[in-house]
Amino acid sequence: MPFPALPTALARALAAQGYEEPTPVQAAVLAAEAEARDLLVSAQTGSGKTVAFGLAAGPTLLAGAEKLGAAGAPLALVIAPTRELALQVNTELAWLYRETGAIVVSCVGGMDPRREQRALAAGCHIVVGTPGRLKDHLERGNLDLSALRVVVLDEADEMLDMGFREDLEEILDSAPADRRTLLFSATIAREIAALARRYQNDALRIDTVARNQAHGDIAYSVIRVAPNEIEHAVVNVLRFHEAPGALVFCNTREGVRHMHAALRERGFSVVGLSGELGQRERSEALQALRDGHARVCVATDVAARGLDLPDLGLVIHAELPVNKAGLLHRSGRTGRAGKKGASILLAPYTRRRKAEQLLASAHIEAEWRGPPTAEEIRAKDQVRMLEDPILSEAPAEEDLALAETLLASKTPQEVAAALIRLYRARLPAPEDLYEDPRDSRPQHGERWRPDREERAAGGAFGKPERLDPSEVTWFRVTVGRKNQADPKWLIPLICRLGHVTKREIGSIRIFDNETKFEIANAVADKFGQAVRATEADDIKIQPATAPGPRKEGPRHDGPRSGPPRERGERPERSERPAAEGDRPPRKPYKGKPGGKPNDGPRKPFKPKSGGKPFKGPPRKG
């Protein structure tokens, strides 16, 4: 379906950018019923919302003219939650309105406010900014809203979540009452609906989000990993997929710094993006991704909304999102504009339930599996090398001449082997991860227990070394059977967090909600200081008392007495053969000694200090 009738300048701009037909949200805002009306729009991320509200505002701003008039007080105001999104909207509107002669000015935090002040004073047609900086210019008298015809609130739900309600209300109260207000949000929550009722007039509700349905172009999967192998799992996932662009999400700035350093150390071309960076550093990081100089971006949720990065085929949640909205908006950075993408959640064994709840709340069906192994990655590397376009390109004459010189001194096998070594040298080495036998089971959540031979051998790590009780100090870690605790990943975790070796760990006792273990006295003080300094978010190690002795259950020393019986058949107690120590059958309760059985209603309660007796319904005996 082609675009409907548009102003000539906007139609030419769309054709120059290769737009042939509108997305669902663009078609909805350009429908005849939406013309000149306030709009309340909910749409999925990556659905073309920026172009949608740019086209919707066009007829109102141009008012039938071919070009806009002289620049003065702004005619349109676009408010976005983050600097990155505001600058991206500025870029999109600049090319869309280029042929109309529009001047677009951005006002965002982190940029020089004096330069923005001069740009506003020189005159403009469209202002794009963040709530805090726009409010600052408004209060200083730099921003004149008296000529506004259109106000756009992009990602309104995010702005409310970030605490910009008061700033938004001040800006909207200062705008003319007869303006058009276009409100775009991923979801229409109660707060968004209240904002719309207050500042919109007879708004048309447009909903292009398919309810209870995840983004169709994104393939979701969950990888179970040991809590101490998150970094190694990220390395293997990046190496296995080899996407042109990938986003790795962490929940904190410290997590971004740590993951960025770990990936850079392993040879990845990686940039970091978090709120602590200046605007220049953030712009350079995003430009490196767009130019292809960096292949991986490690970011906090500041990058989860509004950013449009080309060729972004992979999103990795190194730390689980806080809620459903975070999951959907993080994942929405891929699978945009009809392209396919993958969203992978790394779920430590201790947070499996959290991952399941996130997916259920978002109505997402995900594949559960183990992390890619080093062997699988090397097999993929071999296939990718044989399919590399460099092998099918026509060689230049200079290359052929050099190849003949090389073959005169080396055999073809030696040249091919050198080419393979050169190809592998530029690739980060995959990591060897602990492979949980549960990952091969078809039933998710099935309880796994080692077989008898493995239990007798003490598992893959062997039995813990027996230390004398006077030579050890007990500690506890806050994971147990309910968290699928297993010595196979607990021992490496304890060694990493406590800076000890396996030989200095004694017995390990796993309980329902915790695990207790021994540490040799010689390193106990050092261990305690190390775990206090490197305490993880989900796993805490603390000093503990020694657990009690193991309880021995009842044992059957001989065969069951009495005649054999069929399966499911249970004889009456009177038919069972009496055994030594067997209790006699219980007698019916007769009340107190010398009293009568309780087979009737109790007498009404009569207080000792006088008053009326209790007249409520009789209680059963």
Image: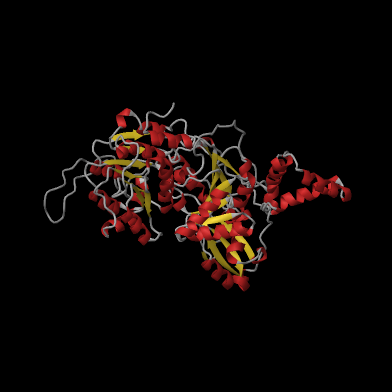
Of residues 35 and 544, which is closer to you in this image? 35
Rendering quarter of residue 370: top right
Q: How many marks?
A: 0
Q: Does the rendering let one see residue 307?
A: yes
Q: Does the rendering let one see residue 551?
A: no
Question: Residue 219 at x, y = what percent?
Answer: 54, 38
In screen coordinates, is 198 left or right of 535? left
Depicted 549 relative to depicted 216: above or below: below
Image quadrant where one finds the N terminus: top left
Question: Residue 319 at x, y = what percent?
Answer: 51, 52
In screen coordinates, is 233 left or right of 416? left
Question: Residue 5 at x, y = what percent?
Answer: 37, 29
Of residues 82 and 408, which is closer to you in this image? 408
**Residue at horizontal 60%, vertical 51%?**
233
Of residues 611 and 155, which is closer to you in this image? 155
Image quadrant where one finds the C terminus: top left
Question: Residue 371 at x, y = what percent?
Answer: 62, 47
**Residue at horizontal 29%, vertical 40%?**
599
Name, please, the residue furthest toward the left: 611
